[in-house]
Structures are given as C-alpha cells and as structure tokens.
Image (cartoon, coloured by chain):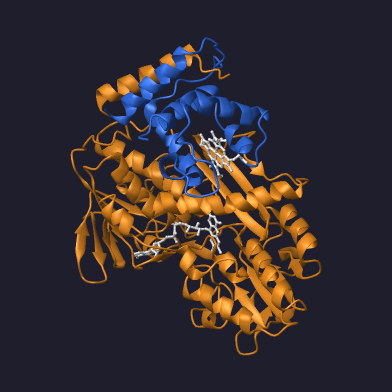
Chain colours: A orange, B blue
Amino acid sequence: MSNFSRRSFIKIAGAAGAATALGSLAYAPRARAAGGHVVVIGGGFGGASCAKYLRRADSGIKVTLIEKQKEFITCPFSNLVLGGLKQMDDITHKFDTLQKKYGVDVVHDTVTEIDPAGKSVKLKSGKSIKYDRLVVSPGISLKWGSIEGYDEKAAEIMPHAWKAGAQTVLLRKQLEAMKDGGVVVMASPPNPFRCPPGPYERASMIAHYLKKHKPKSKILILDAKDKFSKQGLFQAGWQQHYPGMIEWVAGAKGGVVKAVDTKKMIVDALDKHKADVANVIPAQAAGKIAIKAGLADDKGWCPVDPKTFESQKHPGIHVIGDASIAGAMPKSGFAASSQGKICAAAIVAMMRGKTIADVSYVNTCYSIVAPKHGISVAAVYRVTDKGIVAVQGAGGVSPADAPAAFREEEYKYTYGWYDSITADIWG
Amino acid sequence: MSISSRAVLLSLGAAGLLVVASAQAADAPVSAAQAANMAVNCFSCHGPEGRSPGSIPSLQQLTAVNIVALMKDFRSGKRPSTVMGRHAKGYTDAEVEALAGYIAGLKK
Ligand SMILES: Cc1cc2nc3c(=O)[nH]c(=O)nc-3n(C[C@H](O)[C@H](O)[C@H](O)COP(=O)(O)OP(=O)(O)OC[C@H]3O[C@@H](n4cnc5c(N)ncnc54)[C@H](O)[C@@H]3O)c2cc1C
C-alpha cells in the first residue's frame, strides 16, 4: 500500500496548477517560446541530450547541433569492443532521429571560433551561425606533452583509445597481433579525467581477451594516482577471474609515467617498462574549442553555474559534460546527459523569462569485470551553497560481498543501461 | 490536453484512493518543473519516456501509486534491488510522489 498523502498531493497539484497557469512548465510539449535559436556544439552525450530535450520541451525553439563527425561512436562499451564482447557497429549511432523526429537541425562541421560578444560561431566551412544561447559540449582534449614524447604521432603507435573510433580499432588490432606471453602496459591518467573507472574496466576487458586467446600474457597498469574508482570491487574481480595477470602500480610506488619511447616501445615511470602493446592515456582538459573561446580556467576546465551550467566566464554560453567543472559529478556519459537535460530545462525557462526550478542530477557508472560480472557506482546530486553535492545516504558502490547472482544481474543491467541511454539520446 | 494536466488528474485519481498521510512534514513542496528535472534522469536507465528497449524494466505501464510504492520499498530495502535502493534513497517522500506523478502522466 502506498503512502501517497493528501497533503503532498495538494502541494503537487497546487504547484502544477500554478505552473500551468503561468505557462511555465518546462515539459509542456506544445507550449511555444517567444522563439529563439540555441546552437549546440558537439553531438555526444551532453550535446545531443541537450538538443533533444530542448526540442522535447519546446518545439518553438530552433535548435542547431554542430557535430564534426557524421556518426557518433560511444566511449561507453568501447572497452567491450577491446574485449571482443561488442563490435564497432554496436557502439555507432546516427543523428537521423534527432533530425527527423525531434526537428534538430544537425550540421556536420567543425566550430573553429566562438564570438561571445557577437553571439555567433564560425565554422570550418567558412559559415557563421548566430545564436541566442550557446551550449558547448566538446568533451575532452588530450594534453599532449604531459608525458614526454607522447603526441598525436606517438598515439598512432601507443594508442590512448580515450576517444572511441579509429583509436579503439588500432588498440584492438595490436592486441590481436600480440604474441602469447606479451606485456600490455597501460598508463592511467591523473585526476580529473574522463570516466574514472574506465582504465580499470579496460584492463578487465583486455584480460578477458588475453585469458581466452593469449593466457601467458600480462597487463601492467602504471597509475598516476594512488587509488581509483571501485578499486576494491575491481581488484577482487581480477583476483577471481584473472589471477596473476593484472598488476597495478600506484603513483606513489613508481606508477607515474614521465616519458615514452615509441621506437623502443618503452614506457618510462620509476622503472623503464618494455611493452608489446602500450595504451597510454594522458592527462586531459576541456575540448579545444572551449579553451580557445576562453571558457576554461587556468587548469583547463570550465567553471559554470551549478543549476544552469551557464559559463562563469561568458554569460549566454552554457558548458556541459566532461569540459565543465561539475562539483561532485564525475566526467561520465551519464553525468553529461543528465547535465544536458537540466541545462535544456534551464534554457527554456530563461528564454521564457521564468524562474529556474530546483534541479537534481544523477550518475551511475557501470563497469564490466568479466562476462556475467558487472559492478556499479551511483549517486544522486543536488545543488547547495557548496555547489553540486551528492545526496548523503544515497548512492555508493555495489556491495563487496554480493553473491554471483547479483554480479550477473548488474552485468545484464549494464547492457540495459547502454540500450536505454543511447535510445534516450540518439534513438 | 497537456502532459501537466494529465499528470495532475492521474495523481488526483491515485491520491483519491488513499487515506494514509505520512509525508514528512519537513518536505518542501515540489513544483512540476522540479519533478520533471528529477524524472528525466530516470530515463537514462529506464529508456526514453520510461520505455525501456532493453533489460531494465519499463516505467511506462506503472501508475503513480505503483511507482511511489515501489520507490519506497526500494528505499527501505523491503524490495531487494541491485541499484534502485541506492537511487531511491536520494529522494524525499514528496519528491517521490511528484516524480511518480510526472512519469505516470507521460503519453502512453
Ligand atoms: C573507455 C571509456 C569508457 C567509458 N565508459 C563510460 C560508461 O560506461 N559510462 C559513462 O557514463 N561514461 C563512460 N565514459 C565517459 C564518456 O564517454 C564521456 O564522459 C562522455 O562522452 C562525455 O560527453 P561530452 O558530451 O562531454 O563529450 P563527447 O561525448 O565526447 O562529445 C563531444 C562531441 O563534440 C564534438 N566536437 C568537439 N569539438 C567540436 C567542434 N569544435 N566542432 C564540432 N564538434 C565538436 C566531438 O566530435 C564529439 O562528438 C567512458 C569513456 C571512455 C574513454
């Protein structure tokens, strides 16, 4: 029996009624704004979510999404491609639904300049587009040079595969070509970086592939950090499925990678490590265009208002996703999508001259340790005077002592999450 | 009819069946826009508009009463879950009721 109370019903009904009367319901589908044009840069997790939810809320708003790639390949599940559990096609998404069903104007081009004063963006093709509000969701840039000798050219020999696509395919091919008994050296980046559990899910998936095809091989993770996301769950999983195969070296114990030598295939931390395959994930910053437009601080990430994700550097521009500084939220696709939706609601309210409603964000990072073995970390976030903070008592990681059936359920739900979030964004 | 007024009617139907009052007095009232801001986050796992294409259950077929009851049971642990307990603890009674009304009021 539910406890739906009259008192809170009246509160909800009252609030909804008042909101309807004012015409300020962010999700009223046929209500039209005074018009206005929102340009969104980047059709990834943050940008595509924002574009869709803007149109879902208000079909009177013109939305132009500028994305340089014709198709979007998700980083989520790219580790499963490395492990052989998924193919590239499974993680490739089109922009047709956004265009046809939601009426988002999708333009495949690269934004080369943002003019905050003139409220316009310049494209590689030479065109300029005017906006009333701009949303910037360009993801990350890799800090070439943060590891000596590691630049774009070196990444063709020692892939980062931290942007999914050709880099993912390259790393997979190198693993396939490696001899049994080879050593895969991974360099894991310093905080903050895209997808905190990502390097460790990747080690798990590479181990899964090696266990099946090249069981004498080893994986060495050289880490810039002294601890990592879901560490206890990952390490217990490695012990269970891949005993002796994965070695993790903490930053304080000699894990910090200083240099690479792509000719000799050496990854240089406290000791020089010879690699058969090297996966070097360097330090990161906000996507280039955000930095170029002056939206980032001196550390390379973009400060924003926690309720609207409007830039603290340039009013009228919102920065969401990995590029933003989002308090307690990690840099994940789930978080980027949550921010995109909330940012869309805020923009609709702003364009209608209404007050911004209280917000709530969510994140859950699922990781696959092995087939039938999934784990997760979850949180619900609110805004306080300290910015975006996790709700106390909620969230947390999967239980350490869960039975195999629980891990199997979470494995199944990891796929369910991927199916849902990609359908919600591009489907 | 707009989504909002349908949601209210559905909530009204749900509330009409019930007599128990247990929402915490401290709960702040939840506006419809705030309810939307909470509920859209559920779609990342439960699919667009609560219609799941995969292994996570859909929310679309549930009434507001169902959702409120399930959320409270996840929160208390009465209903075992892998992840919902961890999420349900992030919302007050008033918030659960508001977001349930929003989800139940979406176009079927
Ligand atoms: C291996 C790996 C595994 C991951 N697994 C998960 C997971 O399981 N769950 C999860 O939630 N997250 C995961 N992530 C993290 C997730 O991929 C990112 O957090 C997410 O993509 C961030 O979204 P975004 O919108 O900020 O950037 P992106 O999704 O990267 O989108 C940015 C887009 O902007 C475009 N763009 C950039 N600059 C321009 C420009 N100037 N003009 C036009 N277009 C431009 C790019 O082409 C790109 O398509 C993983 C990441 C990695 C690397």
| Residue lying furthest top | B19
Residue at 37% x, 30% y is: B33
User: Number of callouts in the render?
Assistant: 0
Front position in the image: A414 or A239 = A414
Front position in the image: A151 or A33 = A33
Residue A232 visible somewhere in the drawing: yes
Q: Position of residue A227 (x, y in %)?
A: 71, 57
Is A33 placed above or below A291 here? above
Q: Position of residue A211 (x, y in %)?
A: 73, 72
Residue at 44% x, 46% y is: A339
Front position in the image: A376 or A414 = A414
Q: In terms of image quadrants, where is residue A208?
A: bottom right
Q: Position of residue A118 (x, y in %)?
A: 21, 55
Residue A150 visible somewhere in the drawing: no
Front position in the image: A409 or A80 = A409
Quadrant occupied by the N terminus of chain A: top right
Q: Relative to residue B101, is residue A371 drawn left or right?
A: right
Q: Position of residue A207 (x, y in %)?
A: 70, 69
Quadrant occupied by the C terminus of chain A: bottom left
Q: In terms of image quadrants, where is residue B93?
A: top right
| Residue lying furthest bottom | A263
Q: Relative to residue B37, is residue A196 drawn left or right?
A: right
Is B61 placed above or below A259 here? above
Is B71 placed above or below A218 here? above
